[in-house]
Amino acid sequence: MLRRIALASGFAVALPALAAAVDGTAPTPNIFAPVSTPAVAIREIAFFVLGITAVIFVVVAGFAIYTIVRYRRRPTDSQSEPPQIYGSHRIELAWTVVPFLIVVVLFLVTGRYIWSIERQPQPPGALEVTIIGNQWWWEIRYPKLGVVTANELHVPVSEPAQPIPTFITLESADVAHSFWVPQLAGKMDLIPNKTNYLWIDPTRPGTYVGQCAEYCGLQHGLMLLVVVVHPKDEFERWVAAQRAQARDDPATQRGRDLFARLACINCHTVRGTPANGVFGPDLTHLMSRSTIGAGAARNTRESLHAWIEDPATLKSGALMPAMKVSREELDALTSYMVTLQ
Ligand code: CUA
């Protein structure tokens, strides 16, 4: 049961895979370990609110405990009711005005933070990314760099001496989703026919995880988000590799021909081949990603084999149909897929 719950969250499969790939420590979606300005602001405001509510808790609980002890029933108490008191303008005014002022303070402080984050102008050197929510995966496009990928956002580190923030445009191809990588920024919804914006400036290289945070259908739980923050030169190498056309390995000619002949190319793009479908993830550099199905399984030959045979075995409800191919064709297709590095 626990395993099922964990699997449904998407993290269970993806985190160990990522931990192995990164530095042995599993990334954590922890709002108290921010590495980007908007997330730092959220932590500040979280501590501020927690501080105020902690004081309220101590005062209210203190009064309650004091009253319970001070006015407890004693053996010397008379059996008749104590005197009944109705109304006190002074006390009623106090418990109306004080909470009202507290709420006003919380509102003003929150408003100031939201304003300062949302009004941040985009500097000229910023990286532009468009993320499109799909049932149930993320399309990630770099319009100025000519790169299209899925589920794993790669960005350069943004050091104070050389800031390169990433400005993200959020759209949806179907229903409402929500982009949430707690260590980098707050939640922002992806809504059909409405464009939203978000920016991050991660100051430390590493891998950060998030998850779709708006219920979007059966596999809402399997919309893992991975953000890989690279040192600048490493990011440039990643871009160069992603821009390249798909590898054309003559040894997997059979699989490539099948891919072009079957329905695969209606939905998937492999740049450098006739495949230019846009309904499913771009597969040009499929093997550069750590998971398939947005966290449904580690990206290995075995899971690709199972996925092509019937995606529902790894992610029930996935919109890709079982391809109903023979064992030999399945093997050939899988062999082709694993060359797409
Ligand atoms: Cu997409 Cu929940």
Image (cartoon, helix red, strand yellow):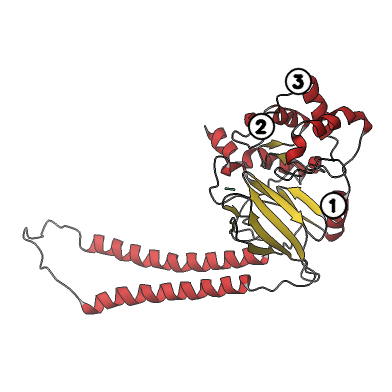
Give the residue type at disc 3. Answer: Ser
The reply to whether residue 92 is visible in this rendering is yes
Q: Which residue is mark 2?
A: 321
Q: Of the residues tagged 1 and 2, which is closer to the observer? A: 2
Q: Are marks 2 and 3 in contact (CB under 8 Å)?
A: no
Front-most of residues 121 and 260: 260
Relative placement, left or right, of 91 versus 251 is left
In space, the residues marked 2 and 3 are separated at their CA atoms by 15 Å
Relative placement, left or right, of 59 versus 306 is left
Residue depicted at x 6% and y 60%: 80
Give the residue type at disc 2. Answer: Pro
Q: Which residue is mark 1?
A: 238
Q: Estimate how packed mark 2 is, as few (under 14), some (14 to 19) or many (20 or more) residues with alpha carbons within 10 Å.
A: some
Please determine whether, in this image, residue 262 is positioned above or below residue 184.
Answer: above
Q: Quadrant of the C terminus?
A: top right
Q: Estimate how packed mark 1 is, as few (under 14), some (14 to 19) or many (20 or more) residues with alpha carbons within 10 Å.
A: some
| Mark 3 sits near ligand 1, with its Cβ under 8 Å away | no
Q: Residue 58, image x and y in percent? A: 39, 65
In space, the residues marked 1 and 3 are separated at their CA atoms by 36 Å
Give the residue type at disc 1. Answer: Trp
Q: Are marks 1 and 3 in contact (CB under 8 Å)?
A: no
Relative placement, left or right, of 8 versus 36 is left
Residue depicted at x 61% and y 74%: 116
Please determine whether, in this image, residue 19 is positioned above or below residue 156.
Answer: above
SS class, disc 3: loop
Q: Residue 7, image x and y in percent? A: 59, 36
